[in-house]
Image (cartoon, rainbow, N blue to C red):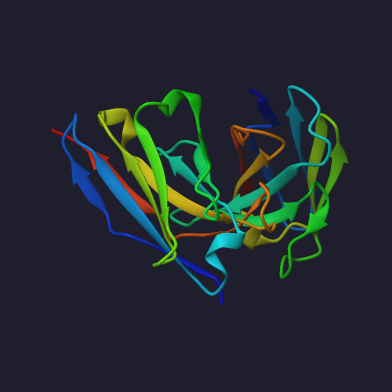
Amino acid sequence: AIQLTQSPSSLSASVGDRVTITCRASQGISTALAWYQQKPGKAPKLLIYDASSLESGVPSRFSGSGSGTDFTLTISGLQTEDSASYYCQHFKNYPHAFGQGTRLEIK
Amino acid sequence: QVQLVQSGAEVKKPGASVKVSCKTYGYTFTTHYIQWVRQAPGQGLEWMGIINPNDGTKSYAQQLQGRIIITGDKSTSTVYMELSSLRSEDTAVYYCARDGAVLRESYCDYWGQGTLVTVSS
């Protein structure tokens, strides 16, 4: 089974900062990767699909890149409402595993 | 508009079974796969399984094989997830989610509100 490793597991940044979260797959998955944002007590929300496509309605400060085994989620110009946990998920084959998550705190 | 509405919270004893429903609205039921994902308290997301509502084919996480059954009902546009032989480690919020692409496995674009299942004696 393909495993996803996210880093860092947590980070703290200030409003206006640029932050990057990485997701590494244990084998190549082309661009079959999505990124989700989850706030406490809420269902996850799709941000990025197919590694770099921005979901409709998601602010343009969110962007994704990568292919094969290495992927990044970048938030440019951090806002207070971006405080949340972030997860990557692959859909190359079954099981559609998730990364372990990254908790983002706004200073 | 697309909506996934899940059944309410459940409290079960160890060894029992639970069946969670996910009723879909606003799109053609048979054209999008449905995934099930769970989240234990304070933990990350765990993929449980997926069903193609068009033909009923499914795939399950290996660690749940033998305890999980996912079914779909075209007449009511509803997907069900049944988990048996419950143990305390199954206490979690269970989510259904729709695959965004048509008739192929993909990312989850719409999610249900979540169903809390508590396993306690």
Image position, residue A13 (x, y; %): 71, 46
What residue do we see at 53% from left, 64% from top?
B29
In the picture, the quarter occupied by the N terminus of chain B is bottom right
Image position, residue B64 (x, y; %): 41, 28
What residue do we see at 68% from left, 34% from top?
A93
In the picture, the quarter occupied by the C terminus of chain B is top left
The residue lying toward the viewer, choosing from B55 and B94, is B55
**In the image: residue A76, left or right of residue B22:** right
Kindly indicate the quadrant of the structure image that contains residue A92. Answer: top right
The residue lying toward the viewer, choosing from A106 and A90, is A90
What residue do we see at 54% from left, 75% from top?
B26
Tell me, yes or no, if residue A29 can be seen here.
Answer: yes
Residue, far front:
B55
Residue, far left:
B121
Look at the picture and state if B121 lies above or below B80. above
Image position, residue B7 (x, y; %): 31, 59
**In the image: residue A17, left or right of residue A82:** right
Kindly indicate the quadrant of the structure image that contains residue A15. Answer: bottom right
The residue lying toward the viewer, choosing from A70 and A10, is A70
The residue lying toward the viewer, choosing from B112 and B34, is B34
